[in-house]
Image (cartoon, grey):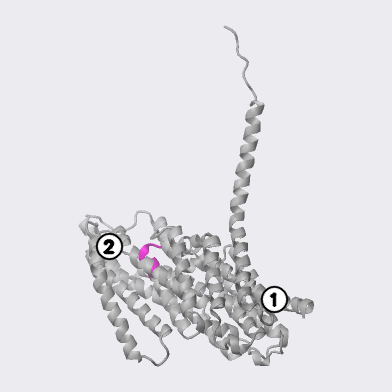
Amino acid sequence: MPSRTPVLTKRTLDKDLDKITHAEDAAKFVSRKLVAPGLGLIFLGLAMLFAGVYVFDRPGAVLIIAAAALGAYMAMNIGANDVTNNVGAAVGARAMTMAQALVIAAIFEVLGATIAGGAVVRTISSSIVDAVQVPEGRLAWIMMAALMAAALWINLATWLNAPVSTTHAIVGAVIGAGIAAVGPQPVNWQVMIEISSSWMTSPLIGGVIAAGLLFLVKTFIIYQDDKVAAARRWVPVLIAMMAGGFTAYMVLQLVSPGRFSALTILALGLLVCFVAWIAAMPIVARQSQGLENRNSSLRVLFKFPLIGSAALLSFAHGANDVSNAIGPLSAIVRATSDLSVIGESSAPLWVMLIGALGISVGLLLFGPRLIHLVGEQITKLNPMRAYCVALSTAFTVIVASWFGLPVSTTHIAVGAVFGVGFFREWYTRNSKRRIQYMHRKAEAWAIDEPEDPNVHEARRRYLVRRSHFMTIVAAWIITVPASGALAALLYWVMFALFV
């Protein structure tokens, strides 16, 4: 039989085809990496054109158009960094997919910014630095430097997967640029004390509210003998509370002050609360049919409330954090244009739209990277706990927006996540109701001790990831001085080059 010579090498054609395949794969990988930045650049160009349509015949048009690009860039960075606050918990709890979460967040961000963003915009644009004490021509450059510094800092934080506060960044940048321009005199330190106080108290409030909500859920639903029946009673109540509270807030935002009394607004909120409760009961009852008496069944019933709370949180985030992008832009428009045309107290609609759309574009293009950090890596979130986090954050941010305080949505959201995590640790060790429930469960199944068979796994599941806590706190601590120093440096550079 004739022997065959083994083929030790690939044929030349096969090797060449493999090289082409590898080159194509590399090109596809690189092109995918460039799609999001490319679309972001297109949006910046459109923002400049959009601004040019409104200001091309006004004084300082070139400066305003450049500021519009910076404002759009800042807005995209806010969307990329802060999308975790809105939908991170919901995605981490697997109540909705990433695509669904991003679409819902984008829509409600725009609505919140355009409907309810005016009060916080006024604080950022005119209350931190007193324009009267700033020499003519310098206010616009102060705000330009602040926008650029805050955007660069947030962009770096997003790249490092650190969910820092965009509010801290822009406030620190405005102060830093203002001091670099004319010293500390124009800074309204009384307003800064109020803002700083809200920064310290708001995450604590968010954590306490989230822990309180989780206490109610555990007490009246999770550790009841018939979980499904308890959820059938209480989930509609939670939905109704959310709907009624949001209705009262919207009335306060959309109706002229003094038109309705507080009693009337409260009555309207209670009416919507009652209607939502009536409407939710048959829906929850239908969803609960055939469900077993297990915690996994509760996750099904909490998906709809969690989606609603994520949408509400996106609205609240748009109302509060849009000011971080367009507050300085609004100040630049007023400083370079006819105040009688622009208006002294509120930003023009086109400015609001640039900020709202920029946040949505940023979260759609760049946001998903941070969702897993807040939603999954910090503490293990199921729909019940995620609902508590989202609703407490939304409530805290909405109240702050009503008072015109530029609080950190990131600060509050992460505070709520940690509040839930720390409460779970305490509740697991100290709750008599839980211990009694576990003993009843053990007796029903004839188990000697109701212990978790894997103590180490239980500890891993229940403990908050403290390493992430320290990383995030460190990022918060350095944000204000870092953005302020960068803004001061940029102001001196721009003032030397262009003024």
State the mark number for residue 62.
1
The residue that appears at 55% across and 76% down in the rendered structure is 350
**Mark toward the viewer: 1 or 2:** 1
In this picture, residue 366 sits left or right of residue 187 = left
Magenta extent: 379-387
**383 in magenta:** yes
Quadrant for residue 253, please give it. bottom left
Which badge, 1 or 2, comes first in the chain's sequence?
Answer: 1
Residue 21: percent from the left, percent from the top? Answer: 61, 38
Whether residue 214 is in magenta: the answer is: no
Question: Is 386 in front, or is 154?
Answer: 154
| Identity of the residue furthest to the top in this view | 1
Query: Residue at point 40% right, 66% down?
Result: 386
377 on left or right of 132: left
Q: Residue at x 43, y 70 (%)?
A: 422
Q: In x, y percent, where is residue 243? A: 34, 75
Say few, some or many: other residues with alpha carbon within 10 Å of mark 2 (under 14 / 14 to 19 / 20 or more).
some
The answer to whether the residue labelled 1 contacts the one labelled 2, judged by CB atoms less than 8 Å apart, is no
The residue closer to the viewer here, 339 or 288, is 339
Residue 364, placed above or below residue 481: above
Residue 423 higher or lower than 30, as above or below: below
Q: Residues within 10 Å of mark 1 (few under 14, many from 20)?
A: some
Q: Position of residue 45 (x, y in %)?
A: 63, 66
Is residue 1 among what the camera can see? yes
Say if residue 412 shows up in the picture.
Answer: no
Horizontally, is 449 left or right of 492 in the view?
A: left
Q: Position of residue 186 (x, y in %)?
A: 66, 90
The quarter of the displayed image where residue 365 is located = bottom right
Dividing the picture into quadrants, the one containing residue 190 is bottom right
Circle 2 is placed at which residue position? Answer: 438
Tag 2: amino acid: Met
